[in-house]
Amino acid sequence: MEKTKSKLTENQELPLVAIIGPTNAGKSTLFNRITGTPQAITAREESTTRDRVYGDVEWQGHCFTAVDTGGLVDDKSELYRGIRAQMFSAVEEADLILFVYDAREGLQPQDQQFLDKLRSTKTIWLIGNKVDAPSIDKQISSLEYLGLPFYKISAVTGKGVGDLLETICKALPKSGNLAKVSGYEPVIALVGRPNVGKSTLLNALTKTDRAVVSPIAGTTRDIVTAKLTIGDKELLLADTAGVRRRGKIDVGVEKFSVKRTLAAINFANIVVVIVDAQEGTTRADLHLIYFANKLQKPVLVIFNKSDLLGDRPITFHHHIAKFDQLITSALTGEGLGAVLEWIEKKAQESEDKQIIKRQ
């Protein structure tokens, strides 16, 4: 597997550190602390993180890329198989693995079995998290019996995190300082209601299994990015959480996910709104289309899942007639060539505008 290239580096590969472990161990909290961003959603709900989330870390002149992953769960459902596959993809490409667990609960038998299988092929460090009180600190002093490098931290308070970063930087190959890319990389946001095929479309366009795909609505929570190469252009696709009508949005994780989707539209250069062709456009779709249009973003409306339409016509609100529209099936590949052509055209227009601004 090709190693991830950080978006913020001068086209050089950075060492990759994968953060894995059981659910609710504080992996996303640690990721957010070391990257200095609230990029990964944190919540008490199990399996809040589902896809791989990447971020750059800079510490005392050293830098590396961290990847947050979904928690290890003994669940054979399709959703959790997808989460587990994403975690193993991160493990495969990583130079170093941080196995984070809740020090208050200790390592569970399934954790030890997992570590035993992995330690022969990968460099793994044990990270006992949530060491917020001296009493907990004393309880876990004997856990070094596994023979793995062991560190005690509190991702919430920052206790021990600085020492951990210093040790990571010493262990990894030295790389240059982080610097913004000199080139221009247009960002295309894929947005829409839950379960319209956004993640399937991202995987189909990039020819990867980058995003977890499941029939369960609301599978995607964090913003998932993947490189898309068209000719000599490198673009960044951003898969986002599904947005429902306001009255149906649950508080907590879903609310945070929706806020990030709207922020992604604001940040993106191009917006692709995906609609379920079987259902046609709804108020939620119109809200996303008008929101992107108000921000003066090029908008493409995709009617996806054409393979399930049969002879039924597509119904859509007459107000969207002024926007570019395409019919696709991310599952069968129908219409994807036209989507790539549209994206390439709009990316070139966006790049031309950036050049004019610089002059």
Image: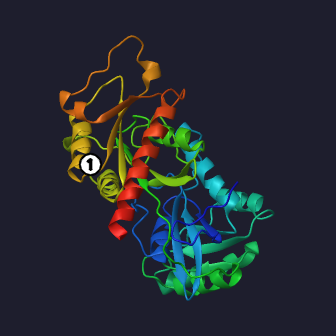
Q: Say which residue appears at 27% left-offset and 30% top-offset.
A: 281
Q: Which of the 4 image quadrants contains residue 263?
A: bottom left
Residue lying at the far top of the rendered structure:
311
Q: Say which residue appears at 31% left-offset and 43% top-offset.
A: 299
Q: Which residue is mark 1?
A: 292
- In the rendered image, is residue 106 in sight? no
**Label 1 sits on what residue type?**
Ala
Question: In this view of the protein, which residue sits in the foreground, 159 or 314?
Answer: 314
Q: Is residue 290 left or right of residue 92?
A: left
Quadrant occupied by the C terminus: bottom left
- In the rendered image, is residue 143 in sight? yes
Q: How is the image coloured?
A: rainbow
Q: Position of residue 9 (x, y in %)?
A: 55, 72
Q: Position of residue 167 (x, y in %)?
A: 64, 84
Quadrant occupied by the N terminus: bottom right
Q: Position of residue 209 (x, y in %)?
A: 59, 44
Q: Is residue 347 left or right of residue 108?
A: left
Question: In this view of the protein, which residue sits in the foreground, 106 or 6?
Answer: 6
Residue lying at the far front of the rendered structure:
359
